[in-house]
Image (tube, grey):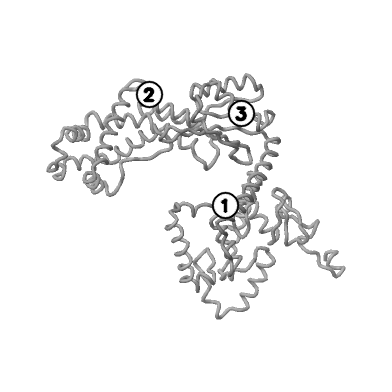
Amino acid sequence: MSSAGSSGKTTRKNALGQRLDPGWEHGVEDGTSKKVKCRYCNTSHSGGIYRHKHHLAGTHLNVEPCPQVPEEVRTQFQKILQAHSEESQKKKKQNLYDVDIDDDDSECIALEQSKKRKQGGAMDGFVTKNSSRQTTLNEKFKKEERDAVCQIIARFFYTSAIPFNCVNNPIFPLMIKRIGEYGRGLNPPSYHEIRETFLKKEVSEALNILENFRGEWVKTGCTIMSDGWSDRRRRSICNFLVNSPSGTIFLSSRDTSDISKTGQMVFEMLDEIVEKVGEENVVQVVTDNASNYKLAGEMLMEKRKKLFWTPCAAHCIDLMLKDFEKKIEMHSGTIEDGRMIVSYIYSRCMLNHWMKEFTNGKELIRPAVTRFATSYLTLQRLNELKGELMNLFTSSKWKSSKFARTRKGKRVEGVALDNRNFWTNVANCLRAAIPLVKVLRLVDSDERPAMGFIYGAMDRAKEEIKKNFNGIKKW
């Protein structure tokens, strides 16, 4: 018997000195063990250490995610919670319904399960033995009410022309949850509150987050990234972002429409940003690989001895694809013929309709992250739909139409049915370009940092291209 038991007192299992849960290394008790204060964002939340672990893992389960937790800590607790979930599923012999109470603490879970076992009988109808997910009372009795609420939410999207992918914003379910927690009688924010009151609070919050990131830059260093954009009216803007192990954050932007982007001007812009972030905090500056940016990078390294200029990997690969198209005659001619087929079909409504009948609704255009990658992905789609296109241009619909009697129509038909030259060239272009497009997708992805994979990916791409042409340099 323990000393606690012999003295007649029971030691609380999560009392100070008894806490073995790894979550306590990243949080402190705030008055009671049921309320934990995060060491990173200094926010307190109820629900005990169980909910605090979800706060660190960023699962959005009954608690807001921590915006400042280091990535390695977030990953650690995601793995811990996943392992705990898998272990619970194995041990669970029967599923009990969930009455939507706050049962985050393990003690509360055990107590609630004990009550449910005693009830039995009338509650057996809520037990789902073959489902890994628990059924809630709302799902059983409030389906019609939920449909009515969701219909109003959807109608707000429709009447305000809000893009549907906004529901994937992690703030959207958090907003719905907060509205539900408030309950009846919530007065929605007014136009003035959205435009002034809460906007100022949001700006203040963003500045606070920026200050927290600045603290990380001092500890770990950071990377400045330059990203330029132009619209159809040739107006341009240059965005500056800062990346560190804590994540990427937008720093500032500058309208460059009235600026001649010489190497000197680009150098002055980058130097100003380095000064703003702090030269001692900057490890490298990443920009496009254009000649003016390259010159600006060399000038920056000459002035700032402790940082490096690095060209953007995605832009470098895009320039490789550009060289394929511009400098290899077969590529340029094949891409031009492919564009001619696509533009001819899409500029004629009836022909576009016929094309979709033959391709079962598939489009000929394949959008991509860059202009030159789009050209090769469109060739890839044409190659995939080669049989369907040839069937279209040999069909009775085409032969009897006015399109087949025009000079341009005959030219498009001749290219689409040219199995000896055009389609052979399409296959050769794809053998050279698609391995690079795969690498471009990797480096331009937001899912995970690509720096640790870029060198191996480029080596594999070169080997794949070499294999596609049987080691022959000229074809």
Q: Which mark is residue 284?
A: 3
Task: Give the left or right position of residue 114, taking residue 10 as reference.
Answer: left
Contact, CB < 8 Å: mark 1 with mark 2? no
Q: Which mark is residue 195?
A: 1
Label 3: few (<14), some (14–19) or many (≥20) C-alpha neighbours in 10 Å: some
Question: Of label 1 and label 3, which has the lower sequence position?
Answer: 1
What residue lies at 69% left-to-right and 66% top-to-bottom?
Answer: 107
Q: Which mark lies nearer to you, 1 or 2?
A: 1
Coordinates of residue 356 in the picture (x, y in percent) = 26, 47
Q: Amino acid at mark 1?
A: Arg
What residue lies at 52% left-to-right and 52% top-to-bottom?
Answer: 169
Task: Give the left or right position of residue 161, taking residue 67 as reference.
Answer: left
Coordinates of residue 208 in the picture (x, y in percent) = 67, 45
Look at mark 2 in the image and give the residue it sits on. Answer: 471
Decide if residue 100 is in sight here: yes
Can you say whether 437 is above or below 352 in the image?
A: above
What residue lies at 22% left-to-right and 44% top-to-bottom?
Answer: 351
SS at badge 2: loop
Looking at the image, which is closer to me, 433 or 256? 256
Label 1: few (<14), some (14–19) or many (≥20) C-alpha neighbours in 10 Å: few
Q: Amino acid at mark 2?
A: Gly
SS at badge 3: strand
Looking at the image, which is closer to me, 347 or 459? 347
What residue lies at 38% left-to-right and 40% top-to-bottom?
Answer: 367
